[in-house]
Image (cartoon, rainbow, N blue to C red):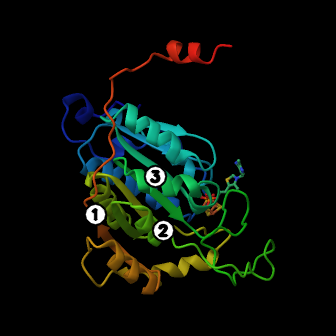
Amino acid sequence: MNDTSDNMRSGAALQPAAFKSDYKPIWCPGCGDFSVLSAFTKAFAMIGKRPEQIAVVSGIGCSSRIPAYLTSYGFHGVHGRALAAATGLKVARPDLTVVVAGGDGDGYSIGGNHFLHACRRNVDMTYVVMDNHVYGMTKGQPSPTTEPDWQSKLSPSGTGLRVFHPLVVALAAGANFVARAFSGDPNGVAAILAEAIRHPGFSFVEVLSPCVTFRPEQRNWKQAVHPAPVEPTNDPAQAARRILTDDGFNVGILYRGDRMVYAPPVGKGKKKPADLERGFEV
Ligand SMILES: Cc1ncc(C[n+]2csc(CCOP(=O)(O)OP(=O)(O)O)c2C)c(N)n1
Ligand code: SF4
């Protein structure tokens, strides 16, 4: 951890820079994920936590590299399994602020099942998906959020497939907070992220984050995004209806729920790893 700051030693609120690591991101110049990284550091400063009180858990993909670029606990895990690892971590260590991060391929394809059940369980953590409608790391395959008519070398006629609606699926599955943000506005992402973290239960933040290499046309998202025209609702059906009929570029908090948070008691009957291992002996 980078512990050189005076604030860190004095216990005063930390500045965003305290949450940056010494590793230089290897993302393509102009990738939207740079701004999301900046938003993470701002949000962590806003919530007044210290690096050792936060854990960032990811899967695999360009976006999933984010824990390495932050100063906090981090876990760069297996493709599509970030939510499973994070759920275990939060249940075992409820004192930690757990933020899960990744891409649309990681979260909605291979990790789709975990996404549904994380929403349903409503453990108190925040899931940030940097959605660029493509698999960036593996060189541009279509993802569940890719438009059906997007033509590429790998999908010369488009996929012809209906797109996955992550925000509506999250609402149907029981997520307790749903928002959309745009990486081109890191302060806006940070404000939403801070609220998502503070909100009890499973918070889901979809960040439109352009892949300038495989989807250069996404640079136009800057002109397309606009603030959501209405205040957030606490009615999931109303939120889902709004999202299904908006243009996909409404940015802001769209739903705030009050479902009971799943937080099993820790410590009762807790076994040591050695006890668990003995249970597998043959
Ligand atoms: C089990 C497994 N299957 C496939 C892969 C290959 N793989 C690595 S990243 C990735 C997709 C990444 O796309 P996304 O999550 O959208 O992230 P991005 O790179 O666009 O940020 C795939 C298919 C893998 N690492 N592990
Ligand atoms: S391939 Fe796309 S998502 Fe990956 S770093 Fe480059 S611009 Fe970002």
Q: Where does residue 166 sit, x and y in percent of width and height?
A: 50, 68
Residue 95 lies, with reference to residue 196, above or below; the image says above
The residue shown at (59%, 72%) is: 145
Amino acid type at circle 2 is Val
> Which residue sits at x=45%, y=59%?
36
Whether residue 190 is situated above or below residue 254 in the rendered picture = above
Q: Which residue is mark 1?
A: 257
Location of residue 97 by image quarter: top left
- Real-space CA distance between mark 1 and mark 3, rounded to the nearest whole angstrom: 15 Å
Locate ligand 1 by image quadrant: bottom right
3D distance between C-alphas at marks 2 and 1: 15 Å
Which residue is at a point 26% across and 70% down the rendered structure image?
A: 234
For the C terminus, the quadrant is top right
Residue drawn at (33%, 79%), measured in percent from left and top? 238
Query: How far from the left and from the top, in percent, is residue 212?
Result: 61, 70
Toward the viewer: 148 or 54?
Answer: 148
Crowd around label 3: few <14 · some 14–19 · many ≥20 (10 Å): many
Q: Give residue 262's quadrant in the image.
A: top left
Is any part of residue 93 visible from this angle? yes
- The type of residue carrying mark 3 is Ala
Secondary structure of residue under mark 3:
helix
Q: Which residue is mark 3?
A: 118
Q: Amino acid at mark 1?
A: Gly
Q: Earlier in the sequence, mark 3 or mark 2?
A: 3
Quick one: SS at disc 1? loop
Q: Nearer the viewer, residue 241 or 5?
A: 241
Judge from the rendering whether residue 12 lies leftward or rightward of residue 193; answer left or right: left
What residue does disc 2 label?
169
Q: CA distance from mark 3 to mark 2?
A: 12 Å
Q: Is mark 3 within 8 Å of ligand 1?
A: no
- Name which of mark 2 and mark 1 comes first in the sequence: 2
